[in-house]
Amino acid sequence: MKIIVAIKQVPQRDSSLRPAASGLWVDEANLGYEINEPDAYALEEALQLREKHGGEVIVVCAGPERAQQSIREALAKGADRGIHVETDAVLDTLQTATMLADALRDETADLILTGLQSDDLGYGQTGVVLAELLDFPSSTIIMQVEIDVDTLRVRRELEDGWFQNIEMPLPAVLTIQSGLNKLRYATLMGIKKAKSKEIRVVQPAAPAASTAVIEKVYAPQKSKQAQIFTGDAKTAATQLVEKLKFEARVL
Amino acid sequence: MSVLVVLEAGHRMAGEALTAGRQFAAALGVPLTAATIPADLTYTADGFTAAYEAHARATNPALVVFAHTYQTRDWAPKLATRFRKVLISDVIAARVDSGSPVFVRQLFQGKLNSDVRATGDGPHFVSVQAGAFPPVEAEAPETISLTPAVEPRQNPEKPFRESTRAVDLTAAPVIVSVGRGIKDEGNIPVVQKLADALGAELAASRPICDAGWLPMERQVGSSGQTVTPKLYLAVGISGAIQHLVGMKGSKTIVAINQDPNAPIFEVADYGIVGDLFEVVPALVEAVQRAKS
Ligand SMILES: Cc1cc2nc3c(=O)[nH]c(=O)nc-3n(C[C@H](O)[C@H](O)[C@H](O)COP(=O)(O)OP(=O)(O)OC[C@H]3O[C@@H](n4cnc5c(N)ncnc54)[C@H](O)[C@@H]3O)c2cc1C
Ligand SMILES: Nc1ncnc2c1ncn2[C@@H]1O[C@H](COP(=O)(O)O)[C@@H](O)[C@H]1O
């Protein structure tokens, strides 16, 4: 079983985000980074599948030099090796998936896992595009993965609490939903071992021009004015309860 | 040239896709068309992609419009890729500027917005966010029925629902909902006390249920329950769209969050900007005083 996990490095949750001076992305000065949340679940699923079926887990990340920190983190959790597609640009999903497909074509993967959505761009499609470029079948928003020789049975989350099981042949691409497993932490031993694991650095071909160009990044305009209570907690709480009782009449 | 709206059979957002399509067609000055695959034909990503690819190649629309549903997420990116285009997904607004469409999409779960220009020749592909283009009363365009065209690689079984829910949040008049701001499982009693004081049900955002701090059946949002209580208190919840769709119909919404720019304040009627670990205990006292 050769399983590839696509991980994206994204700004840490609760980062304070400001548009960059260029207006084309966010100001990256002083930002910390982490592995995109559903990608961490995808990695965990890959590690559990390897424990069951044997084989190899390879993580791939397209990003600038700092992306190697996230690859190392995945290696420390137990991935066998990494592929770093080195690029400084903010790419669209077709550009990213093209670079990932080029880097993965010779790996002859059995299964490729991605997260269902990135925290920063939030397009929710890179995995499906990658599948299309590699001509693999795909399924999305996956909550359970079972493998029987060369067939895959997955549980897809539908809306309003519905689910559906789907079978398809390997190799395939799945986009993983958060919460399908319990994340592990890297052990000290894992961190130590990660230092000697291989990270292959790939220089991608220049991407084709984007057909979805980000022209401007900006703070959303506030449309609805909530009544906000500030000041010390006690005063704010008292004011809120007054409003709920006498204005909204919900207490 | 036209705007083609893809209508997902039986989906509540079909009307929203039509509203968006109508708006985009007017802005581009082209006719509006629609297509659907009837609900009795089994959905697969491969089957739907092939059917719509053939239709789009034959009709060459300027723009193909989808509602941003789970089904759309599963196959529309494949279709766009066949035309070497990005599916400009989850858009909340659009305009035509110097002849080409510009779409507004959220970044970072609604903390920032971006303007995205669709450049080059069509067809372009766009999906619209729930609630961004409310359905209107208007004549429906001619709708073409398509049939899945290829032998799909996916073999889907019948959809099912997990066993019946033990808690029915939809019946609760007051809900206290907790998000990742609570930081740790051991802190859940902080919000439970508020729920008790208000006689409310306790609910949560997805990460809380993912972590197992509260059972899945207490999750509110697109993959949880949709609730419309008379009072919904969101405690330490940022207000990502997948959460908002499950609670924004509530009569009165209160948000407690330390980040004054959290998107949750956009749907709130009242808000307290502050540390929930100070605000919530103070609120428990204030509620107890008001009720006694
Ligand atoms: C297909 C799909 C389906 C999804 N379905 C759902 C769903 O059904 N329901 C759902 O909720 N999500 C769903 N999500 C996830 C959703 O996108 C968000 O990731 C999630 O809602 C975020 O949860 P949160 O607000 O609790 O966490 P965060 O976004 O991390 O927000 C935490 C908030 O707490 C605040 N905070 C931190 N500390 C404090 C403090 N001490 N005092 C006060 N405030 C504090 C922060 O300012 C922040 O705003 C789905 C996502 C996808 C892609
Ligand atoms: N630069 C990248 N490197 C590796 N994987 C990526 C990258 N961008 C996106 N992905 C994967 O694609 C998923 C969906 O991203 P998106 O389409 O941007 O929402 C993410 O969860 C990742 O698994």
Image (cartoon, rainbow, N blue to C red):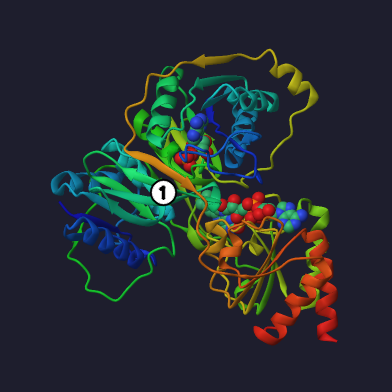
The image quadrant of residue A119 is: top right
**Quadrant where ligand 1 appears:** bottom right
Chain letter belonging to callout 1:
B
Q: Is residue A191 left or right of residue B4?
A: right
Q: Is residue B36 visible?
A: no
Q: Residue tagged by mark 1?
A: B73
Using the image, determine if residue B157 lies above or below residue A135: below
Q: Is residue B84 left or right of residue B176?
A: left
| x and y percentages locating residue A161 in the rendered image | 54, 61
Q: Residue furthest front?
A: A21
| x and y percentages locating residue A82 in the rendered image | 57, 20
Q: Is mark 1 within 8 Å of ligand 1?
A: yes
Give the residue displayed 82% in from the left and 56% down from the top. Answer: B187
Q: Is residue A76 visible?
A: yes
Q: Is residue B51 left or right of residue B215?
A: left
| x and y percentages locating residue B233 in the rendered image | 68, 69
Identify the amino acid type marked 1: Arg
Q: How many marks?
A: 1
SS class, disc 1? helix
Crowd tier of the residue under label 1, counting other residues whose Cα lies within 10 Å: few below 14, some 14–19, many 20 or above: many
Give the residue displayed 60% in from the left and 61% down from the top. Answer: B264
Between residue B193 and residue B170, name the one nearer to us. Answer: B193
The image quadrant of residue B255 is: bottom right
Between residue B92 and residue B224, name the one nearer to us. Answer: B92
